[in-house]
Image (cartoon, helix red, strand yellow):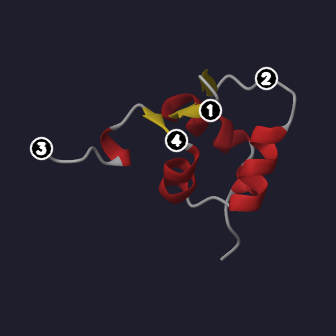
Protein backbone atom coordinates (compact mmCIF):
# COMPACT_ATOMS: atom_id res chain seq x y z
CA UNK A 1 0.00 0.00 0.00
CA UNK A 2 1.37 3.38 -1.02
CA UNK A 3 1.70 6.19 1.47
CA UNK A 4 -0.54 9.17 0.65
CA UNK A 5 1.25 12.26 -0.64
CA UNK A 6 0.43 15.79 0.53
CA UNK A 7 -0.92 16.55 -2.95
CA UNK A 8 -3.64 13.92 -2.54
CA UNK A 9 -4.58 14.79 1.06
CA UNK A 10 -7.26 17.24 2.22
CA UNK A 11 -5.80 17.59 5.72
CA UNK A 12 -2.07 17.98 6.46
CA UNK A 13 0.02 17.84 9.59
CA UNK A 14 2.18 20.95 10.23
CA UNK A 15 5.37 19.39 8.83
CA UNK A 16 3.63 18.38 5.61
CA UNK A 17 2.09 21.85 5.28
CA UNK A 18 5.50 23.52 5.68
CA UNK A 19 7.05 21.34 2.98
CA UNK A 20 4.06 21.41 0.61
CA UNK A 21 3.58 25.20 0.66
CA UNK A 22 7.26 26.18 1.07
CA UNK A 23 6.72 28.00 4.35
CA UNK A 24 9.05 29.45 6.93
CA UNK A 25 9.05 26.92 9.76
CA UNK A 26 9.55 29.59 12.44
CA UNK A 27 6.74 31.84 11.19
CA UNK A 28 4.32 28.94 10.70
CA UNK A 29 4.80 27.47 14.18
CA UNK A 30 4.51 30.98 15.65
CA UNK A 31 1.17 31.32 13.85
CA UNK A 32 -0.05 28.00 15.28
CA UNK A 33 0.98 28.98 18.83
CA UNK A 34 -1.15 32.15 18.84
CA UNK A 35 -4.34 32.02 20.87
CA UNK A 36 -6.54 33.27 18.01
CA UNK A 37 -8.62 30.68 16.19
CA UNK A 38 -7.90 30.13 12.50
CA UNK A 39 -10.41 28.51 10.19
CA UNK A 40 -7.72 26.26 8.70
CA UNK A 41 -6.62 24.64 11.99
CA UNK A 42 -8.46 21.57 13.26
CA UNK A 43 -7.57 20.19 16.69
CA UNK A 44 -7.25 16.40 16.76
CA UNK A 45 -6.50 15.35 20.32
CA UNK A 46 -3.33 17.18 21.26
CA UNK A 47 -2.31 17.66 17.60
CA UNK A 48 -3.22 20.42 15.18
CA UNK A 49 -4.07 19.55 11.58
CA UNK A 50 -4.26 21.95 8.64
CA UNK A 51 -7.15 21.99 6.15
CA UNK A 52 -5.38 22.41 2.82
CA UNK A 53 -8.03 24.37 0.87
CA UNK A 54 -8.73 26.79 3.74
CA UNK A 55 -5.00 27.34 4.27
CA UNK A 56 -4.47 28.06 0.55
CA UNK A 57 -7.02 30.89 0.87
CA UNK A 58 -5.25 32.18 4.00
CA UNK A 59 -1.89 32.15 2.19
CA UNK A 60 -3.25 34.28 -0.65
CA UNK A 61 -4.07 36.97 1.90
CA UNK A 62 -0.85 36.46 3.95
CA UNK A 63 2.06 35.64 1.59
CA UNK A 64 4.63 36.69 4.23
CA UNK A 65 4.58 33.14 5.64
CA UNK A 66 6.42 31.81 2.59
CA UNK A 67 10.19 31.39 2.71
CA UNK A 68 12.34 34.15 1.28
CA UNK A 69 14.36 32.76 -1.61
Q: CA distance from mark 3 to mark 4?
A: 20 Å
Mark 4 touches mark 2? (CB < 8 Å): no
Q: Residue beneath label 1, please?
A: 48
The answer to whether 26 is drawn above or below residue 53 in the figure is below
Disc 1 residue crowd, few under 14, some 14–19, many 20+, Cα 10 Å: some
Local secondary structure at mark 2: loop
Please give the name of the residue rendered at 56% of the width and 39% of the height, measured from the top-left corner. 56
Which of the two discs, 4 and 2, sits closer to the camera?
4
Mark 4 or 2, nearer chain start: 4
Q: In front: 18, or 65? A: 18
Q: Residue beneath label 4, please?
A: 13
Q: Which residue is outermost to the front? A: 46
Local secondary structure at mark 1: strand
Q: Which mark is residue 57?
A: none
Please give the name of the residue rendered at 85% of the width and 26% of the height, measured from the top-left corner. 36
Please give the name of the residue rendered at 63% of the width and 23% of the height, measured from the top-left corner. 43
Amino acid sequence: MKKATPESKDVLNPTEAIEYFGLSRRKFYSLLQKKSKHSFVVPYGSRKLIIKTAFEKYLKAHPELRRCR
